Structures are given as structure tokens and as C-alpha cells.
Image (spheres, rainbow, N blue to C red):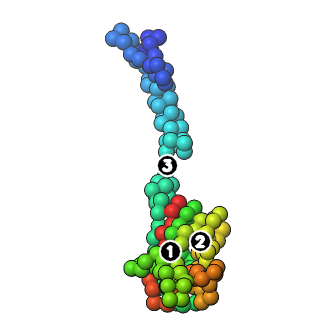
Amino acid sequence: MSSTNKTENLMLNNWTGSDKPQRIDFNYDNEVIDREITRHNQDTDVHVNEGERERWNTYMYSETFYGNGNEKRVIKTKCPFSARFGLIFADESPLSIVRFDGKNQHSYFGVFSPLVNSLGLYLEEDGVTLNVTHSSLPVIVNEYVNYNEIGLQYRIVMFR
């Protein structure tokens, strides 16, 4: 049996030179070590699984689509999380075009979130489905939204 010396944290036997170890002491120490390691490994406050790690490390998602010219379009993205904020813009296009001859403006850039959206955009409650508009008539005085113009490639960027 060990002397009265014990380790500070797990209270395992701390042998001295004059101690005579016995099997019961080793078994006790092994049970304590096994119990504490098991408890630690199962503690989800300090350990994360691969799925959680992947979700936490994926803070942004992006995909593209081609405009088909429809006035209203629902885009079910493949975003792996429910977005809190996002952007949409036409690739290789300016964010907005002002046409002085017709005294109007055409927007090709917008933001969306569950709470607030640019005109012509709506993010559904699932956080992955985006409703876009391509207006043939102004949505407000002399302003058109162009989030689905035929032939243009659009990029959607979503943030966790």
C-alpha cells in the first residue's frame, strides 16, 4: 500500500521508496484515471465534433445563377447554414447604372437579411431561399431593380 502521499488533483497513489504497492492500489488508480478521462472526453463544453467544427468554420457561402428575365424568381440556394446577412450583384456589371436620357436608375446590387432587405429582395425565414425581382416598371420613382436580368450572371454571397 502507498504512503499517505496522494496526487493533488485526482488523489492517485503517490509512491515513495519505502512503499509496498499492492494490486488494489493500482486498480483504484486505473479506475480513477479511466473515469476522469471518460468524463473529459464526453464533455461537449470542451470538445466539438467534426460536424460542429465544419459549421463554425463555414462563415461564408457563395453561388451564382443566370438571370432569366422573369419579374419574380425564387432561388433556393445550397447554402449550408441559415444566413444572417447577404449580398447580391451582377458579375462584371456596375452596381448601378444611371440613364440620364430616361432619367432613371437601374440597380444591380442589393443586400438582404432576415430583418431588412434592399427593394426587390426578400430572404425567407429558412435563411437560404432568396426572392429576387427584375422590374420592368420602376419600384420607386424612376428606380428599377435588376436582380434577374436575362443573360447576366449574378453572385449571391451569404454570411453566417
What amino acid type is highlighted by mark number 3? Val
Point out which mark residue 118 bears: 2
Q: What is the number of the mark on residue 48?
A: 3
**Residue 82 showing in the rendered view:** no
In the rendered image, which residue does mark 1 sit on? 109
Element at label 2: loop
Callouts 2 and 3 close, C-beta under 8 Å: no
Q: Which quadrant of the structure image shows residue 7?
A: top left
Determine whether 50 is above or below 68 in the image: above
Q: Is residue 101 visible?
A: yes
Near mark 2 (Cα within 10 A), the count class, few <14, some 14-19 or many ≥20, is some
Q: Classify mark 3: helix, strand or loop.
A: loop
What amino acid is labelled 2 in the image?
Answer: Ser
First in residue order: circle 1 vs circle 2: 1
Q: Secondary structure at mark 1?
A: strand
Residue occupying the point 42% across, 80% down: 93
Sequence-first tag of 2 and 3: 3
- Could you say where residue 143 lies in the image, as x and y percent from the top left? 58, 80
Q: CA distance from mark 1 to mark 2?
A: 9 Å
Report if the CB atoms under discs 1 and 2 are less than 8 Å apart.
yes
Q: Which residue of the protein is positioned furthest toward the top in this rendering? A: 18
